[in-house]
Image (cartoon, rainbow, N blue to C red):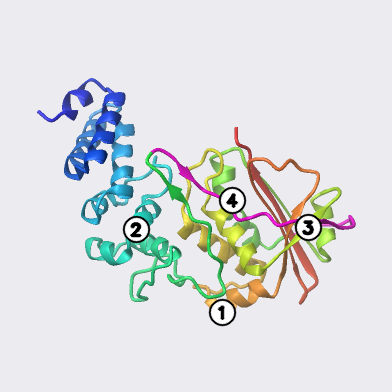
Amino acid sequence: MRDYEPLIDRLDLDGLVRLIDGYCESRDWETLFRLREACRAATKSGKQVWPASTLAEYRLALRAPAEWATKVLTEDVGRFTIGPLSEVIAQHHSWRELAPLLPDTPLASFVAHECAIRGEHIDDDLLDVLEMPFNVEEWEPQYSLALYRDNDAAFDSPEVPATTAINAAQGTAIDEPHALRDATHQLVAGWKESSNGSLCTALVNGSIPEALGALCIESPRIGVLEPAQALAWLAWAGASGGAHSRRRGNAIGRFNAWSLVAALNDIDEWPMASERVRDALQSMQWCWWEGNVPATGWRLQLVAYDPSCERSWAIWANDSRV
């Protein structure tokens, strides 16, 4: 009888976690994989040992050699892990070693995107469900990377710039196009739908102060962002799960950021052309804003001005830590 079998029968999650720690320390990946399979089978029969199965597959994706890590990378796993296993596996594995072991599936496409965001070159002939370049373009930022550890993770945001006060202004919001509303809600869907988040936006025919006025921001301050820095903030929010929702990963975050920029500039083509997204991003003036709002939890406080049509758009999204 395997060491883990009586623990599964007794629903001893503490004992199973200790075993998982031990298998990782001894690098006994085969037994760890068998424990994971046994826990999955037991869960299907009604035994509530899915936390042990989830932890085992997370550790395999994070720490095990590619031959074992890829065995847990299937469409039906990772639902309760800290982040998507397609992102977890990219932290310590290269696409070069993973690709021969993965079938050409949508999930493999996400892994390729995550590896590319971490700096690896990906061939363009791979199936791509996101229909955007795998390889990070020269005009894009260094996206904020997740740091996965054995029992937790860090999802640091980009740096908040220094801000200076500006004169407040009255602004009147106009109706946002459906595409812009959809892209904005998709960007912070994790914060709003599965956590404590809130979202306010304002589109105005006018200046940056008027857009902030439409959001009722008092004593506004702004810090200028380079377009690439603004894209990094958008992608960070799009990848995040906020306080309580599961992280969605940088592949989704980058896609959501590109989609938002395209929607702001009325680009409705599909797939999105890299050059058009670049030109749209760089044609706008981007700022971080501060004001009469608490600086706690997850937050996205951007404002952008399009000089070609003298139109400004501001977003105030946040998610509390409790």
Q: Do tag 3 and tag 1 residues touch (Cβ < 8 Å)?
A: no
Q: Nearer the viewer, mark 3 or mark 1?
A: 3
| Depicted 153 relative to depicted 287: above or below | above
Secondary structure beneath dot 4 equals loop
Name of the residue lying farthest toward the left: 1
Check disc 2 and report the residue beneath it: 107
Calculate the distance from the C-alpha at mark 3 to the C-alpha at mark 2.
Answer: 40 Å
Q: Nearer the viewer, mark 3 or mark 2?
A: 3
Location of residue 229 in the rendering, given as x and y in whole percent from the top left corner: 63, 64
Residue 152 falls in image quadrant: top left
Q: Which is more toward the observer, 80 or 6?
A: 6
Segment tinted magenta in the rendering:
151-175
| Image quadrant in which the N terminus is located | top left
Q: Residue at x 81, y 44 (%)?
A: 292
Other residues around mark 2 within 10 Å, as few (<14) / some (14–19) / many (≥20): some
| Image quadrant in which the C terminus is located | top right
Secondary structure beneath dot 3 equals strand
Calculate the distance from the C-alpha at mark 3 to the C-alpha at mark 1.
Answer: 28 Å
Location of residue 32 in the rendering, given as x and y in whole percent from the top left corner: 21, 40
Other residues around mark 3 within 10 Å, as few (<14) / some (14–19) / many (≥20): many
Q: Do tag 3 and tag 2 residues touch (Cβ < 8 Å)?
A: no
Check disc 4 and report the residue beneath it: 188
Location of residue 76 in the rendering, given as x and y in whole percent from the top left corner: 31, 47
Give the residue type that dot 2 points to.
Answer: Leu
Q: Do tag 2 and tag 4 residues touch (Cβ < 8 Å)?
A: no
